[in-house]
Image: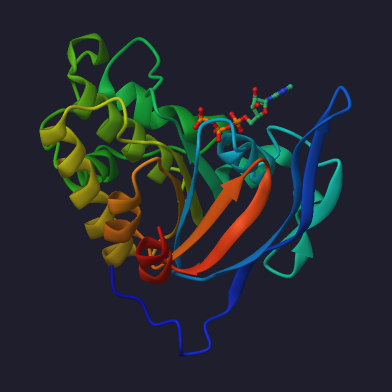
Amino acid sequence: MQSDRSSGQDTILKVQDLGYQNDGKVILKDISFDLKLGEHLAVVGSSGSGKSTLLRLLNRLLEPTQGRVVYKGRDYKETPPRELRRKIGLILQQPYLFPGTVADNLRFGPAQRQAEISDEAIAELLSNVDLPDFAGRDVANLSGGEAQRVSIARTLANSPEILLMDEPTSALDEESRLQVEKLLCDIAQRQKLTFIIVTHDMQQAGRLAETALVLEGGRVQQYGPVEEIIHAK
Ligand SMILES: Nc1ncnc2c1ncn2[C@@H]1O[C@H](COP(=O)(O)OP(=O)(O)OP(=O)(O)O)[C@@H](O)[C@H]1O
């Protein structure tokens, strides 16, 4: 995906020497990178290298044991966790939807903060994920690709400033995977969304991101323009 890294965009997220230990085991150590507004960063690395842990630290589902994260110029701990998780939304590999209709799922996030979302806004969110006329559908009857697109729409209903995605297409078949990828590209360009995507697939990283961070054993092994990292592999 094209981006404009040379135009002096603002840094939205600054990750400084971030680390996480659990029960004396070092899971992540000395992770540092800057995320610019509108940037798309892929986090790649072998299984167990710490990719999911990094995403969980970035929206405070886990608390770092080392370093800090600066979100829009302030330590992210100054933002209440629920608000932070709205602004830094997380999409998981397996979409988790609440029982009910697609519209019920989209209304849930805004309702948590006493905000209402209109039928027109729901229709627009669904059209953004290529699911027009799905508002009244029971989520129990959705395909995996449709469910993942609803979960993307649900996250976008919270108007996040950064989207964190943990292998969002790895549970999908090839056709749905490409559909969701295309959708992410379209939304990112249309809404100038900043995102971090964890993926096992270096080719997918090349299609979706401009920068890549390679984790190995909980440490940064490489960090730079995605094409340089693909060629080095
Ligand atoms: N809360 C925890 N307590 C102890 N160990 C953990 C915890 N969370 C993760 N781990 C371990 O930390 C390491 C990194 O896990 P993580 O899930 O972040 O890796 P990953 O790169 O996302 O892996 P995968 O690609 O298989 O999803 C693994 O060895 C995992 O077993």
Identified at 26% across, 25% down, the residue is: 147
Q: Is residue 25 above or below residue 18?
A: above
Q: Quadrant of residue 64?
A: top right
Q: Would you say 95 lies left or right of 127 here?
A: right
Residue 91: where, in percent of width, then height?
A: 44, 36
Q: Would you say 121 lies left or right of 163 here?
A: left
Image quadrant where one finds the C terminus: bottom left
Identified at 68% across, 32% down, the residue is: 61
Residue 135: where, in percent of width, then height?
A: 20, 27
Residue 229: where, in percent of width, then height?
A: 43, 64
Farthest residue, direction right: 24
Q: Quadrant of residue 38?
A: bottom left
Q: Would you say 79 lies left or right of 140 here?
A: right
Whether residue 160 is visible, yes or no, is no
Image quadrant where one finds the N terminus: bottom left
Q: Would you say 134 lies left or right of 162 here?
A: left
Q: Is residue 206 above or below residue 200?
A: below
